Image (cartoon, rainbow, N blue to C red):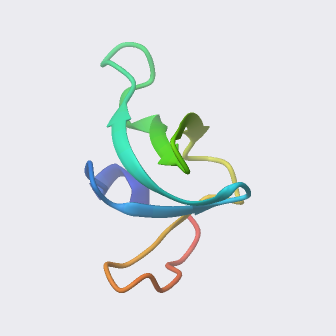
């Protein structure tokens, strides 16, 4: 799965806009299956299984869905 290789600082596109990954859930609480994304100053938590979440490459281009 594409999101299992993502890291803090990567850009993601969400239904609420483009944001930066700032963290993940703790191990045992979902870990990297939950992305903590900062969008316009607001922290949102998204599940990697959500079809509306896309990892962007460093140039801001859309990646494939998870």
Residue 14 in view of the camera = yes
| Depicted 63 relative to depicted 22: above or below | below
Q: Quadrant of the N terminus?
A: bottom left
Give the image location of residue 50, x and y in percent: 68, 49
Q: Position of residue 64 (x, y in %)?
A: 54, 77
Q: Quick check: 43 above or below 63?
A: above
The residue sitting at the top extreme is 28
Q: Indicate the quadrant containing the C terminus: top left, top right, bottom left or bottom right.
A: bottom right
The answer to whether one can see residue 1 in this image is no
Q: Residue at x 59, y 39 (%)?
A: 47
Position of residue 55 in the picture relative to residue 18 (left or right): left
- Which residue lies at the image location 38% right of the left edge and 48% below the top edge? 21
In terms of depth relative to the viewer, which is nearer, 18 or 46? 18
Image x and y of residue 42, in percent:
56, 37
Instruction: Tell me: residue 35, above or below residue 51.
Output: above
In the image: residue 58, left or right of residue 62: left
The quarter holding residue 28 reads top left
Between 60 and 25, which is closer to the camera in this rendering? 60
Q: Residue at x 33, y 60 (%)?
A: 10
Farthest residue in the front direction?
Answer: 41
């Amino acid at each position: 799965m594409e999101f299992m290789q993502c890291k803090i600082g990567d850009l993601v596109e969400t239904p609420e806009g483009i944001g930066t990954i700032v963290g993940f859930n703790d191990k045992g609480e979902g870990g990297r299956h939950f992305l903590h994304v900062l969008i316009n100053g607001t922290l949102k938590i998204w599940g990697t299984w959500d079809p509306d979440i896309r990892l962007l490459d460093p140039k801001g281009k859309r990646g494939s869905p998870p």
